[in-house]
Image (cartoon, rainbow, N blue to C red):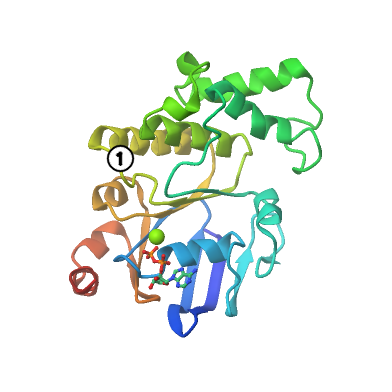
Amino acid sequence: MSSILTVEGVNKNFSGLKALDDVNISIEEGSVHAIIGPNGAGKSTFLNCLVGRLIPDTGTVTYFGQGKPENLSGVAPHEINQKGISRVFQTPEVFEELTIFENAMIPVMAHLDGSYKLNSWGGVLSRGEVIDHAEEILTDMGLIDKRDVHSGSLSRGDKRRLELAMCLAQEPKLLLLDEPTAGMARADTNNTIDLLKKIGETRNITKVIIEHDMHVVFSLATRVSVLARGHIIAEGTPNEMKGDARVQEAYLGG
Ligand code: ADP
Ligand code: MG
């Protein structure tokens, strides 16, 4: 297996507070790598350093998704996105005033105006092709029956579904998820787990998932890193981490 992303010696301070303290991590291509840890451990800061929202004070983030190694430190978020890295937020972000279908059209259309790298659809698409692709992805994600529903009125689970559809329309190689089931009822959480599994069946997308809910971690992850006070204190398979005393202490101490 080869790495799609490596993080080496990353530090991030917020006016004296060490949010990330010498973080080293390697994400294997094709894995579902969970980052767990108590509140305030630095998980979101870590993710923000990967997508260009924050720049590490020191250390390197290297991406291998485009053949040759690329240093992502200091690269703008939209450029990182163009390289094939997509991110979903803790709270689903969709255009609430638009319908599901209109939302799905946006990332598909974005391929037309040159702001996104041309993808395997072969560049400029006709209006019919744009509609076809948007419909295809909504069908895939189980949203086609609700295509004309205004997105603002959707349940949190359906908003997450739509947000993932919009991400997948960009055909990412690496998908970063920050607590994708936060605030969801159990049924929506289980739907989201099933959806993420389904995405994995037909697409080769590596996933980094920040997660609080151990049920989600054990359902999806192939690898787990434990972050506490800005530092990776343990790493292994979900089963190895389950019984690890350091992990339990970090959680009880957090
Ligand atoms: P987690 O996502 O694991 O809950 P965060 O990465 O959000 O943790 O936060 C890690 C630490 O850094 C916390 O102590 C938090 O208060 C602090 N922090 C996060 N973002 C900022 C910021 N923009 N400015 C100052 N402090 C921050
Ligand atoms: Mg967070």
Residue 249 percent coordinates (x, y) = 19, 74
Which residue, as the protein is rendered here, is positioned at the far bottom?
A: 16
Q: Secondary structure at mark 1?
A: loop
Q: Is residue 75 left or right of residue 190?
A: right
Residue 204 percent coordinates (x, y) = 54, 42
Which residue, as the protein is rendered here, is positioned at the far front?
A: 97
Q: Camera-side residue: 55 or 35? A: 55
Q: Amino acid at mark 1?
A: Met
Q: Is residue 232 left or right of residue 14?
A: left
Q: Quadrant of ligand 1?
A: bottom left
Q: Residue at x 33, y 32 (%)?
A: 191
What residue sits right under mark 1 in the picture?
184
Image height of 195 relative to 145, above or below: below
Q: Is residue 22 left or right of residue 112?
A: left
Image height of 246 relative to 38, above or below: below
Is residue 5 visible to the viewer in this orientation of the structure?
no
Q: Residue at x 21, y 69 (%)?
A: 244
- The answer as to whether callout 1 falls within 8 Å of ligand 2 is no
Residue 9 percent coordinates (x, y) = 53, 80
Is residue 95 visible to the viewer in this orientation of the structure?
yes
Q: Residue at x 72, y 62 (%)?
A: 68
Image height of 106 relative to 18, above or below: above
Residue 46 percent coordinates (x, y) = 48, 66
How packed mark 1 is, by other alpha carbons closer than 10 Å (few <14, some 14-19, many 20 or more), is some
Q: Residue at x 72, y 35 (%)?
A: 110
Residue 122 picture quarter? top right
* Quadrant of the rendering where the C terminus is positioned: bottom left
Q: Is residue 81 left or right of residue 195?
A: right
The tally of labels here is: 1
Image height of 114 relative to 32, above or below: above
